[in-house]
Amino acid sequence: MDDLKKRALDYHQFPIPGKLSVESSKPCATQDDLSLAYTPGVAEPVREINADPANAYKYTNKGNLVAVITDGTAVLGLGNMGALASKPVMEGKAVLFKRFAGIDVFDIEINAASPDEFIQTVVNIAPTFGGINLEDIAAPHCFYIENELKKRLDIPVFHDDQHGTAVIVAAALLNALELQGKTLPTAKIVFLGAGAAGCSCAKLLKLMGATNVTMVDRTGVIDSLRRDLHDNNRELAVVPSSNKTLADVVPGSDVFIGVSAKNALDATLIKSMAKNPIIFALANPDPEVLPSVAHAIRDDILMATGRSDFPNQVNNALCFPYLFRGALDAKATKITEKMKVAAAHALSELAREPVPADILQAYNLKELKFGKEYIIPKPFDKRLLARVSSAVAIAAKE
């Protein structure tokens, strides 16, 4: 860990601090270049945009520029680290946007005294951008912030911690269910964790056909008699019954999806699950159960985690670059449920296809094929850009 710390700090400090820079996309080497880039030539696109705001997409970088915005209240697994301390993460997100989808990003860290102040700040700067990616904002404020911005802006607004996670989970689960001989409409699904990611995942799965979903949080099963529910988990509440705890609802379940905490799923509960169970242990960096532990308990499990050192990493980098690429290409004004479903199906379908040699080489593998240890594409799969972004663009236009 000491070596990792040093390498990470050196990576961020040298040869220049940070991970981003701004480069000109036009030449500026002569007096003529300067007269076009700035005064007097720059007045011409200004007039065109003033006459028709849509011309901003023609004469500026608005159509390929996304803001990655946070208040730093839920940074990775570190919690409320503050706006400034969140900047390395936002820069990292920008790197992924550029690397995987060619999208430019300004990272913006906002000190805001309230959600409404945060919202107003984003609204005020929104004309600069073609899309807004909200990041690392704590629940329940993240729900309110996203919903309000969607109402007030005419560009896509996307909270990746919610919806990016949901898309990847849905794509991976579709394939996991097929491999385990189960279906989404008939599977009994239990969630541990009902924050931003958990609620969004459950809602998308229900939209795609899941009929038996139970949410569990620190208090217990989310049922309609609970008085501590908010708008975003109230619609996921189940009919009250004698089942009040995780131990009550896991037995006989087909799927466990954890977005909670380290070691939250114990051996007794794993043994109690239905035949050919699916476990998505997504707590980071330490999952609800380690794959080695789960597989030692029973041999019919299919597992996914959020970590790159285990098979089947549920990685948001498989979603947000391509979702935004499709949305920007289609000049979409919002991210719809249909666009998210299209992205999930595109990812699911790609994982079932033969894996190109360059992917095997990138991951130092001799073979990789659709199965229990490969249910979701790898982040460096070059096919993702065309497949996912085009599926999203088509859904946006429809």
Image (cartoon, rainbow, N blue to C red):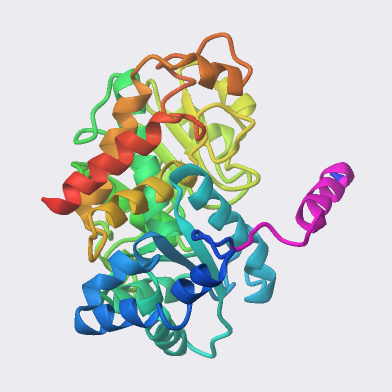
User: Foreground: 45 or 370?
Assistant: 45
| Percent position of residue 200, x then y | 34, 56
Q: Is residue 275 left or right of residue 50?
A: right
User: Foreground: 294 or 5?
Assistant: 5
Which residue in the rendered view is the most extreme toward the front?
31
In the image, residue 225 above or below residue 355 = below
Over which residues does the magenta segment extend?
A: 2-22
Q: Quadrant of residue 221?
A: bottom left
Which residue in the rendered view is the most extreme toward the top?
366
| Percent position of residue 151, x then y | 24, 78
Residue ID at (64%, 67%):
87
Residue ID at (69%, 70%):
85
| Percent position of residue 95, x then y | 57, 52
**Residue 263 visible in image:** yes
| Percent position of residue 277, x then y | 40, 26
User: Foreground: 172 or 378?
Assistant: 378
Let me know if residue 11 is in the magenta part: yes
Residue ID at (43%, 42%):
257
Q: Is residue 102 left or right of residue 288?
A: left
Let me know if residue 242 is in the magenta part: no
